Image (cartoon, rainbow, N blue to C red):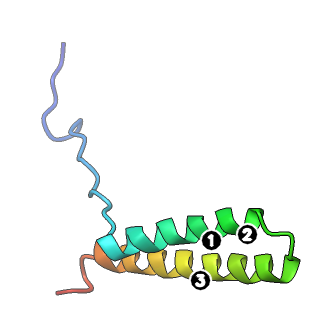
Amino acid sequence: MVVRKDADMITKPATITAPPRAVRLHIEAGNCLDIAMGKEDSAFAADLIDEAIRLERRARELAAAANDRGKFR
């Protein structure tokens, strides 16, 4: 059995973490979608879906910013 030191090393990828606000926004986006599914008023449901999209987009922005190592240097 041949053991290589550097060539076969598997590096652990950086852990992706989301700040608490991003997690809350993600949960709130899901809540908006849950509420929209139960509404018969399509205009109101559409507004809730739009809000869910905005919340999820912001949650992803916050998570990406938190995981961008060069951003805070």
Q: Depth check: 48 or 11 in front?
A: 48
Neighbour tally class for label 1: few under 14, some 14-19, many 20 plus, Cα within 10 Å: some
The residues bearing labels 2 and 1 have C-alpha atoms spaced at a distance of 6 Å
Mark positioned earlier in the residue sequence (2 or 3): 2
**Type of residue at label 1?**
Cys
Name the residue located 15 percent from the left edge and 23 percent from the top edge. 3
Residue type marked 2? Ala
At x 25%, y 41%, the residue is: 10
Task: Please rate how many residues cluster around mark 2, counting C-alpha atoms within 10 Å: few if below 14, some from 14 to 19, many from 20.
Answer: many
Q: Are marks 3 and 1 in contact (CB under 8 Å)?
A: no
Query: Residue sitting at 30 percent across and 76 percent down?
Result: 66
Q: Secondary structure at mark 3?
A: helix
Quadrant position of the N terminus in the picture: top left
Residue pointed to by mark 2: 36
Give left or right: position of 41 versus 48: right
Q: Mark 1 or mark 3, which is nearer the start of the sequence?
A: 1
Instruction: Tell me residue 11's x, y (percent).
Output: 23, 47
Residue 10 lies left or right of residue 41; in this view the side is left
Q: Are marks 2 and 3 in contact (CB under 8 Å)?
A: no
Distance from Cα at disc 2 to Cα at disc 3: 15 Å
Tell me the amino acid under the disc marked 3. Answer: Arg
Disc 1: which residue: 32
Which of the pair 21/34 is nearer the observer?
A: 34
Q: How many residues crowd mark 3 within 10 Å: few (<14), some (14–19), many (20+)?
A: few
Q: Please name whichever residue, 28 or 41, is drawn nearer the observer in this view of the structure.
A: 41
Q: Which residue is mark 3?
A: 54
- What's the distance in space between the residues labelled 3 and 1, CA to CA? 11 Å
Q: Quadrant of residue 5?
A: top left
Closer mark to the observer between disc 2 and disc 3: 2
